[in-house]
Image: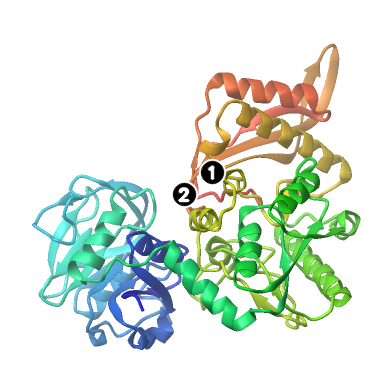
Amino acid sequence: MSDLVAVIDFGSQTTQLLARRIREIGVYSIIIPYDSWQDIYKYDTKAVVLSGGPSSIYDKDSPTIPVEKIELPILGICYGMQLIVHQLGGKIISDDQEYGPAHLKLIADSVFLKGTDGSTVWMSHKDRVEAIPEGFKTVGITNSIKYAAVENNRKKIYGIQFHPEVTHTELGKQILKNFVIDIAGASADWDIKRFISEKISSLNRSIGGKKVLVAVSGGVDSTVTALLLKRAGADVVPVFINNGLLRYNEEKVVLGQLEKLGLSVVYEDASELFLSKLKGVQNPEKKRKIIGHTFIDIFTKIAKRQSGIEYLAQGTLYPDVIESSVVGKNSSLIKSHHNVGGLPEKLGFKLVEPLRELFKDEVRELGRNLGIAEEYIQRQPFPGPGLAIRIIGEITRQRLDILKKADKILIDEIKKNGFYNKVWQSFAVLLPLRSVGVMGDHRTYDYTICIRIVDSTDGMTADWVYLPEAVLRKISTEIINKTEGINRVVYDVSTKPPSTIEWE
């Protein structure tokens, strides 16, 4: 068993990202809900990290743990830092909220923050530390925060007001490494190859030889799921459901790819059923729920046509779970995902999600280790609800056809100009906005397409991508000239956070 770092979850939307960053430095990490904090003693835990969270320590029923009872190195982040300070005799005040970049300045020598002086850090908080407990010293400040980083070396307790887990914090991984390895003494002996070995062994014990229905879409998540289960000795029955919300000619591309990988696929064209159920629906959460329920209904019917199905497998990832989950009453729901929301209580078969604890780039690395070709590994993420959440408002056949054509033009141009494998995601969104235009001598009153292109490493944070003017101009011209019903193209220049990558 590897050395382990326990991340105590206080409801932050980036808790899983924090655990993942620790794994990136080679130390295995798990997440433990704050009300189960004593579980840290079930493992060979080397250190404890207290996550951020949306609560204030002064809120009624705010999440808490007895910090003084944990006799291990502790790092508190944002809310976690405030909890430490509050419990050990310092003072927290509510102040003007701060969201965005700041510059860290070290004012004392610190093993914890070595090598990070002058670096950019990311703030996201309402409360802040006004006075630190006895035995602590300040080691880092910013222009607006006089207690940006504090420590008590004797007790090995450390706190930072900013978030080292997000990519916007320039040297966040260095800070985590300083704490986990240099201070806590954990061994960096965990990697994706070890995960594969342990996961295959675990899956073999639980479902080896058993029949597993696998939802496949042609994307990297579901493809890796199917191959991993097959490698673990499961009797895999891959099922591809065409929900009518796929990209242009996507069903043909997907079936061809899966056959090349040696997967014998059960194909179900349910496009008319999905579209009929979505008729008149505009609310994005309702769309997702309808699509999720319909998927499961169809899987259940397919399973009944097969003999001996015991399990349903899905390619659920950490970002799906993060944005769909509410951790107790202290976390905020962002949006549900089709493969983690809408599952009926009684499936009739058990659910297996072997990738549930991984992020997208970890899954890609896993796929490479399983021998999947790079062209499949590098496919950009595509949401389970498909184009339903890229058509803002009601879904009609006409609007679906418009978006498919516009999206194909965008992807073709992105590939042609060498950007497809350089960015995280590229897609078109059809807005429910019509505007006046002129084509030839005729007045038009048509829809607007929004182009969304972002760069990311994990899907938890993302920046919009700057494209050369000539490329944007070509994309816009091609979409307007070749897509009937479109007379305007706009470009989305928002980051995540505060925006999400998908519009719905």
Residue at 63% over, 74% down: 233
Viewer can see residue 279: no
Per the image, the residue denoted by label 1 is 424
Q: Nearer the viewer, residue 487 or 369?
A: 369
Q: The N terminus is located in which quarter? A: bottom left
Where is residue 240, by image quadrant? Answer: bottom right
- Say above or below: 36 vs 496: below
Residue 361 visible from this viewpoint: yes
Going from N to C along the chain, the mark reached first, 1 or 2, is 1
Q: Where is residue 46 in the image (x, y as percent from the top left)?
A: 27, 77
Label at residue 282: none
**Colour convention of the picture:** rainbow
Q: Residue 457 carries which label?
A: 2
Q: Which secondary structure lies at badge 2?
A: loop
Q: Of the residues shown, which amino acid type is indicated by label 2?
A: Thr
Horizontally, residue 367 falls left or right of residue 56, namely: right
Q: Who's the residue at 75% across and 24% down the image? A: 480
Q: Is residue 104 above or below residue 413?
A: below
Residue at 64% x, 79% y is 208
